Amino acid sequence: MIKVAINGYGTIGKRVADAVSVQEDMEIVGVSKTRPSHEAFIAKERGYPLFIADIAKKPAFETAGIPVAGTIDDMLKSADVVVDATPGGIGAKNKALYEKYGIKAIWQGGEDHEVAGFSFNSDCNYHQAIGRQFVRVVSCNTTGLCRIIHAMDREYGVTKVRAVMVRRGGDPGDIKRGPIDAVVLNPVTIPSHHGPDVQTVLPHIPIVTLAMIVPTTMMHMHAVQMDLKSEASREQVLDIIEKNPRMGLVRKATGITSTAELKEYAMDLGRCRSDLWENGIFEESVSVLGKELYLFQAIHQEADVVVENVDAIRAMTGAITDPQKSIGMTNKAMNFTAI
């Protein structure tokens, strides 16, 4: 069994913990929190040992009825891999601690590529992650872009990508972020950081990205256009999407035309937390004009990187060397059937 520690039990960390806990070849040895919170209560309910950075705060946890198993150092001593899901910028500061214990570590897309020197996507570069000590799982937007770009590049070759990211203003539980009544260019300059981030995984792909944030919490929406090296048909592209276990078609017959309806659909399907781990590609939007491909895809910012973390764990430990086998194991354990 691969022993996994989760440093940072928040939006991503709690989801990764739950995903790891149902894998037949992994177990959670602990999760960490900095203060008592509703998430700390959930960790207790799940039976995850809870560790804290500052042992002086132990009385505050125990007063709240949350037992403390020890310090983060104690947690790392019993783990093979640590998934760092701390807020962006904090994870990089933890690298020295992971180096101290010689532990394999995974960071999230909120950190720069340089923190690990290798950025990961299950579809694109699983083999290159095998045996690595440090890996960064790219952000939710980059993950979604890499999946669809790589699929088309493998089949037809991609000469250029242009993508517009319409990003959510904050997560559903984030009460401190906005905007409330605005469309904010984020950034005003072009390209946004998403294109260069895609190139940390797919360095040969020319890509230009633009981004804005809007007053919603549900999901991101991408408008994607690709120039292909060879001509494709709409039917062929739809077939490729349908066969990819990390991409799902939002079919015309469902009547879904918004992120809100798509999230409601995921909830009705019984998905844990209404999560969508796959790209939600709108079937009606897929258009092919000669060598030009156009589509809309919805990306659930809280969820799509979760399955990538699980696959990264297997690659880094060398437990599974076949990416499709790992993807299949991850999806099956999570009862992940595409939308």
Image (tube, rainbow, N blue to C red):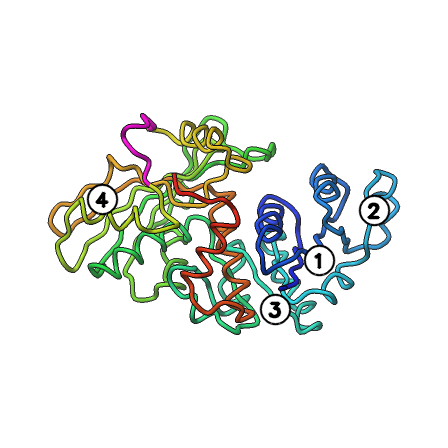
Label 2 vs label 4, nearer the camera: 2
Task: Give whichever of 214, 336 is nearer the camera.
Answer: 336
Q: Is residue 12 above or below residue 171?
A: below
The three-letter code of the residue at mark 4 reads: Tyr
Q: Are marks 4 and 1 in contact (CB under 8 Å)?
A: no
* Label annotation for residue 104: 3
Which numbered disc, 1 or 3, marks the residue closer to the eye?
1
Count the numbered circles shown: 4
User: Mark 4 or mark 1, which is nearer to you?
Assistant: 1
Q: CA distance from mark 2 to mark 4?
A: 52 Å
Q: Label 4 belongs to which residue?
A: 294
Tell whether 62 sits left or right of 304.
right
Q: Which residue is under mark 1?
A: 29
| Spatial separation of the CA atoms under disc 3 and disc 2 | 27 Å
Q: Earlier in the sequence, mark 1 or mark 2?
A: 1
- Neighbour tally class for label 2: few under 14, some 14-19, many 20 plus, Cα within 10 Å: some
| Quarter in which the N terminus is drawn | bottom right
Whichever of labels 2 and 4 marks the residue nearer the N terminus, that label is 2
Say which of 328 and 181 sits in front: 328
Question: Of the residues under marks 3 and 2, which one precedes in the sequence?
Answer: 2
Between 154 and 319, the residue placed more toward the observer is: 319
How crowded pointer 1 is (Cα within 10 Å; few <14, some 14-19, many 20+) is rated as many
User: Which badge, 4 or 3, comes first in the chain's sequence?
Assistant: 3
The magenta stretch spans which residues?
A: 249-256
Q: Amino acid at mark 1?
A: Val
3D distance between C-alphas at marks 4 and 3: 39 Å
Q: What x and y, as percent, mark residue 64? A: 84, 38
Indicate which label's residue lies in the foreground, 1 or 2. 1
